[in-house]
Image (cartoon, rainbow, N blue to C red):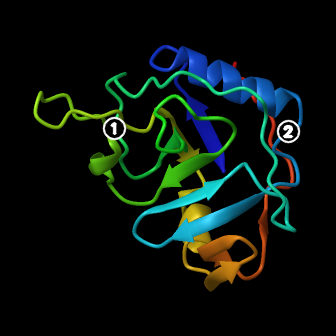
Amino acid sequence: IILELDGRQAPLTVGHFLELVDAGFYDGLIFHRVIPGFMAQGGGYTPGLKLKETDDAIPNESGNGMSNVRGTIAMARTGDPHSANSQFFINVADNSRLDPRKNMANGSWGYTVFGFVIQGMEVVDKMVSVQTGPQGKLKSDVPLVPIVIKKMSRYTFQ
């Protein structure tokens, strides 16, 4: 899977993500949550479902004009909008409900999109089609056979 990251629209998120890539943080971690018609999430667990995160949460940049559409990569987070750490997800459908809402009645933070899959979306589609179930502390959607990130590295186009 090859991603193109947008450091102009999400500079803090891209900077944080690339620091983790350069440090080898993601190597050997898994996609621990895959849901057909929604997304594939990874970057926070080992194959034995041991949580691995950094101590750094990053500010939410979801108001950057980028939308959670099919083929985009975004940061996962808890209910705290500024809690994104190392986990990310790739949208396999248009998920605009994850974008920020700016109206006065029910405005909310969204999930920061920071790039696009430019090659390998068929791999992501295969990932979300595997058999899943509960494992360890995770109640559902965990691939029964681990989907491992062997190596994540930076490539700069010339």
Q: Residue at x 32, y 54 (%)?
A: 94
- The front one of 143 and 55 is 55
- The front one of 53 and 145 is 53
The quadrant holding residue 108 is top left
State the quadrant of the C terminus: top right
Distance of label 2 from label 1 (alpha carbons)? 26 Å
Residue that mark 2 sits on:
25
Tag in front: 2 or 1: 2
Q: Residue 110 carries which label?
A: none
Instruction: List x then y, in percent, for residue 43.
Output: 72, 49
State left or right for residue 63 relative to residue 146. Answer: left
Instruction: List x then y, in percent, for residue 87.
Output: 65, 45
Q: Residue at x 80, y 42 (%)?
A: 152
Q: Which residue is drawn at 57% across and 68% down?
A: 34
**Residue 123 higher or lower than 91, as above or below:** below
Q: Which mark is residue 67?
A: 1
